[in-house]
Amino acid sequence: MISSIAAPWSVYAEPAKKPAAEPSAASSELAANAKSAVLMDSDTGTVIFEKNSHDRLPPASITKIMTMVLVMEAIDQGKLKLTDRVQTSEYAASMGGSQIFLEQGEEMTVDEMLKGIAMASGNDASVAVAEKIAGTEEAFVQMMNAKAKELGMKDTQFKNCNGLPVADHYTSAHDIALMSQALLKYNGITKYTGVYQDYLRKDSAKPFWLVNTNKLVRFYSGADGLKTGFTSEAKYCLSGTAKRDSLRIIAVVMGEPNTKTRNQEVTQMFDYAFSQYTNHPIFKVGDTIGSVKIEKGNVESLSIVAKQQYSILLRKGKQSSDNIRHELVVPNELKAPIAAGDPIGKLVVYQGDEVVKEFSLEAPAAVSKASYWTLFKRTCAKLFFVD
């Protein structure tokens, strides 16, 4: 069922809170060895399980999730192309730890750099793309912290773009889940995070074999990302994601004692989520949700198209989808100009009479102001139209 409601702007200015799923006795056994953990439904942000989820801890290379968010955002906004070449500075080439061994002056495409970051956790590649986007790593880190604030990450402070040990660089399992959710909104990202092995410099004299540091992408059905991390201070960390049917899950663990335990406990979190929960789809990517009238625009109305899957999380066997309905809440009219990404309304999902989820909606395209001539012709057409 779809219905549209014209409403004043103040009705949907306040974002909906993300509810926690009903816990069970089995969920209390999850992530037993982790210092901190979260299990989340990616589509709705519903937290299924959490353990010390707001503790501020060093994230090691999981930091690179935010680096990839900003790279994908720049691509999405047309500021960067996958084919653009990135030149390695002396500073980027000097990074220690995990790397793809970039040399000063060496160039790779953004596509290749993303492979190096997502699969090999390249500290050098992370700095190279940061400098490409912002000019300096310091300026890029400011962008990272601004994005964290925008996403509601209240337990986070970034000091670099790759997670190498530095004072006052921290985040939480909860915030990692939020930035993982943001990264997964870019459909092409799992092309990088979900591949087990690939090559860089394939046609050169020294090809570089990439093997994904996240072994779950090979050994767990449906796993296709996202990022591992390790330092002696952070211990073993992982933000993993897996999708089965239309349900995508994010599982985050921090401070695990070793890789085997880390992988086992994320596997258990995935198994629990897929065995206990399902989702009820409302709209899939590309579906038309509705439209809103535009005042004095170069078009008279704007179609609202789903940029992501909209669904609600249901507990298997306990919650019926029979009485679920949704409403599109938009103003009577929006005034041009409108930029792509501007807030234009919300989608409200009900179970019976209870609101179970609200999704903010954005303009899928820009709408410029109509010329006086266009407005004149439009007015004349309405004056002389005969039914």
Image (cartoon, rainbow, N blue to C red):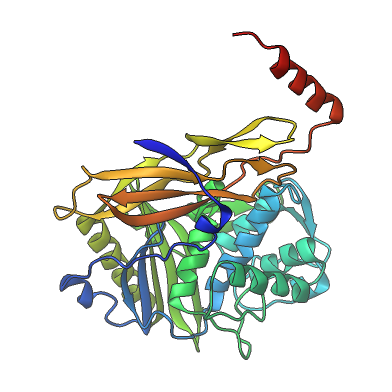
Picture quarter containing residue 73? bottom right
Residue 46 in the image: above or below residue 288: below
**Foreground pick, 259 / 53:** 53
* Residue 183, percent from left and from top: 54, 58
* Residue 312, percent from left and from top: 33, 52
* Residue 265, percent from left and from top: 30, 72
The residue drawn where x is 50% and y is 89% is 233
Residue 326 in the image: above or below residue 15: above
Left or right of 378, for residue 315 = left
**Foreground pick, 352 / 126:** 352
Residue 122 visible to an observer of this rendering: yes
The residue drawn where x is 50% and y is 56% is 11
How many numbered dots are placed on residues in this image? 0
Picture quarter containing residue 136? bottom right
**Foreground pick, 259 / 355:** 355
Residue 211 visible to an observer of this rendering: no
**Foreground pick, 29 / 342:** 342
Quadrant containing the C terminus is top right
The residue drawn where x is 60% and y is 84% is 169
Quadrant containing the N terminus is top left
* Residue 202, percent from left and from top: 65, 49
Picture quarter containing residue 125? bottom right
Residue 41 in the image: above or below residue 330: below
Pick out the residue farthest to the top. 386
The residue drawn where x is 36% and y is 76% is 37
